[in-house]
Image (cartoon, rainbow, N blue to C red):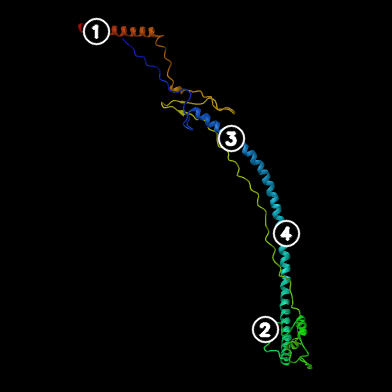
Amino acid sequence: MSYTYFPPRTNFFPPGMPYLAGMGSLGDYAADLAAYKLKLLKYQRAMVDWNALKKKYDAAVIAYANTVSSIDASYASEQSAYQQDKAAWDKEYVTYLFAVKSWRNACDQIKASNAQRALTIAQGYGIAVPLPSWFVKQGYCLSQAQIDSYAKQCVTVKGLGYAGLGSNDPDCGWKRMPLCAFPAKPAIRAEPAPPTAPKYPAKPTLAAQPVAPGAAPTPPAATTPDGGGYTTTKTPGPGKLSPSLVPVPDPATVPEPIADPNANGGMMRNGLILVALGVGGYLVYRTLRKPKAQAA
């Protein structure tokens, strides 16, 4: 009789199983953890620099607020002074308009008088009429310099033995023209200009706060193809790049220990022989018992 040996079935895998976070090997998890720690270190260093910048930024914000407040106060003062000055100028301007009107009336009267006198002189000295436009624009009068120039050109004696009165010499007539003497035109100071809008310094700025890298990768429990599982018995501590994983089999799936077939072969064979003998004796008993029963 031959016997078939079936090895025990195991329900868990050795270390190195995939972890669910990235569905990679435990070596991948170690790499992910190392990358995370590097990101965390960079983040912590960036936060140190950012906090230093934040302190400077807070101080700059206070200084900026003080500067803006000072500028606003100065501008408000200038605006108030301008409004007062503008109100005063508006009154001055009304007075100025009345003065200009009176001045023009006086000038018109002087021009009318000059025109009448100039026409009389022109007729007496043979000056062509109408009078030149430049002379009319000046108010029918000449400046003192123009009168002096005509006086030099005026000749009182023309020809031998002739003592003319100058009535036939236009230059002599021009030197007798009215002297321009008009009242001064009223003046007013320039209109006040509003203050220039204030210019503010640039506002302080602060770089965005660094973002934390998030939670560290952790190796969750993984399920094996045949339903078994394992858990980690130790969480990686600071400064360790790879966890120490120990597979823990599911007690429900662990088979009962089986003796070594080579070491216990004799016992198994003896047991099987005894069973065979017992079955054979029972069959002989049944065979002998039936005839006795029939005979009875």
Residue type at numbered disc 4: Ser
Residue at numbered disc 1: 287
* Quadrant occupied by the N terminus: top left
Residue at numbered disc 4: 74
Question: Mark 2 and 1 residues: CB-CB less than 8 Å, in contact?
Answer: no
Q: In this view, does 64 lie to the left or right of 285?
A: right
**Disc number for residue 133:** 2
Residue type at numbered disc 2: Ser
**Disc number for residue 40:** 3
Q: How crowded is mark 3: few (under 14 residues within 10 Å), some or many (20 or more)?
A: some
Question: Mark 3 and 1 residues: CB-CB less than 8 Å, in contact?
Answer: no
Question: Mark 2 and 3 residues: CB-CB less than 8 Å, in contact?
Answer: no
**What separation in Å lies between label 1 and label 4 (alpha carbons)?**
132 Å
Q: Which residue is drawn at 72% across and 64% down?
A: 80
Which-is-in-front pick, marks 2 and 1? 2
Locate residue 188, reporting x and y percent: 73, 73
Does 166 sit above or below residue 69?
Answer: below
Which-is-in-front pick, marks 4 and 2? 2
Which-is-in-front pick, marks 1 and 4? 4
**What separation in Å lies between label 2 and label 3 (alpha carbons)?**
95 Å
Residue type at numbered disc 1: Thr
Q: Residues within 10 Å of mark 4 (few under 14, many from 20)?
A: few
Q: Which badge, 4 or 3, comes first in the chain's sequence?
A: 3
Secondary-structure class at tag 2: helix
